[in-house]
Image: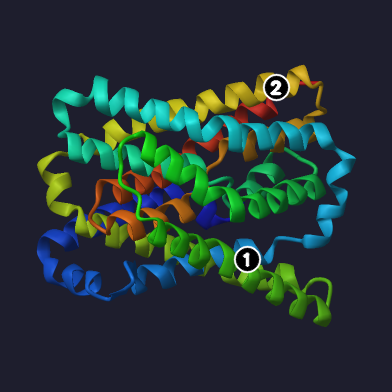
Amino acid sequence: MGLFERFLTVWVGLGILAGVGVGLWIPGVFALIAAIEFAHVNLVVAVLIWIMIYPMMIQIDWSSIKQVGQKPRGLLLTLVVNWLIKPFSMAALGVLFFEYLFAPWVDPQTASEYIAGMILLGVAPCTAMVFVWSQLVKGDASYTLVQVSVNDIIMVFAFAPIAAFLLGVTSLTVPWETLLLSTLLYVVLPLIAGVLTRELLLRKSSTAVKGFVAALKPWSIVGLIATVVLLFGFQAETIVAKPLVIGMIAIPLILQTYGIFAVSWLGARWLKLPKNIAGPACLIGTSNFFELAVAVAISLFGLNSGAALATVVGVLVEVPVMLSLVWLINRSRIA
């Protein structure tokens, strides 16, 4: 794990402080950036999100799909957790906390936006960081690649319908055109670009992909931190007025992460998966593709929305919580 990944929470925290500080000091800069949009897509944020997502898509190996049948139980576990459990449990927790437990402190409109951000985090499957998590638990590298590849292919078809369904169930109006455009812009096109780039690099040498991704990784982190600065710059006045809001959003997100991991862990034990398969399977099922969630939240609800803020809080809690799960796996005797 490199310096950027190991201290990602620190960088995100510094980005939050910088965003709030600049947002209070020179809010006009953020207003100017907000105006640079086309078809409800902020072009500045779109570029930053692409910088984050593109390196992950290059790592997707379509030829690995042929290995799907080699370890079907681990793949089945992850797919069930990622697509049949996690989105719905996240929506349920969002409703529980923001429509009931935290209702006295959050107005209904803002609560709905927080729930929407949580739903988008729950629907978005694993982030590129799962390659790091898998390595830290001595997981089967080829199996991890198969898992991520299969999940990304399913995401092309399942993300928009599940997100629309859950947002609709929670009484949020879903602009289908914007949701489909976001899926095209942040899932389909980066996936195509990643596949083409991978093919071109492999024609040069078998190690070219690894070297190119490594060169892009620092820029991916820069894109993430810049996005955090922008979002918290727009939210600066709200955060100063309601400083506890980040903690309120973080509580259900942390509960969701540990809860989904527990379900995955019990499933892995029941299926009698070996540890090098069970470890990455549980972490892939638990992790959220926060880059995609941030992008779609901004497109659907705006840069200064509660939904966008909720997805960024998801970024903030992801790394320390996932590292704690890595610690648990490394000290366990699952099989």
**Percent position of residue 269, x then y:** 75, 19
Instruction: Determine the residue positioned at 48% across, 55% down.
Output: 292
Q: Secondary structure at mark 1?
A: helix
Instruction: Determine the residue positioned at 25% across, 53% down.
Output: 17
- Is 283 left, or right, of 140 in this rendering? left
Q: Is residue 53 above or below residue 200?
A: above
- Is 77 left, or right, of 32 in this rendering? right
Q: Amino acid at mark 1?
A: Leu
As drawn, the label of residue 40 is none
Q: Is residue 320 visible?
A: yes
In 3D space, how far apart are the residues under numbered discs 1 and 2 (Cα atoms)?
30 Å
Q: Is residue 103 above or below residue 204?
A: above
- Is there a contact, CB below 8 Å, between mark 1 and mark 2? no
Q: Which residue is mark 1?
A: 191
| Frontmost residue, 170 versus 330 | 170
Q: Secondary structure at mark 2?
A: helix
Q: Which residue is mark 2?
A: 267
Instruction: Determine the residue positioned at 33% across, 43% down.
Output: 310
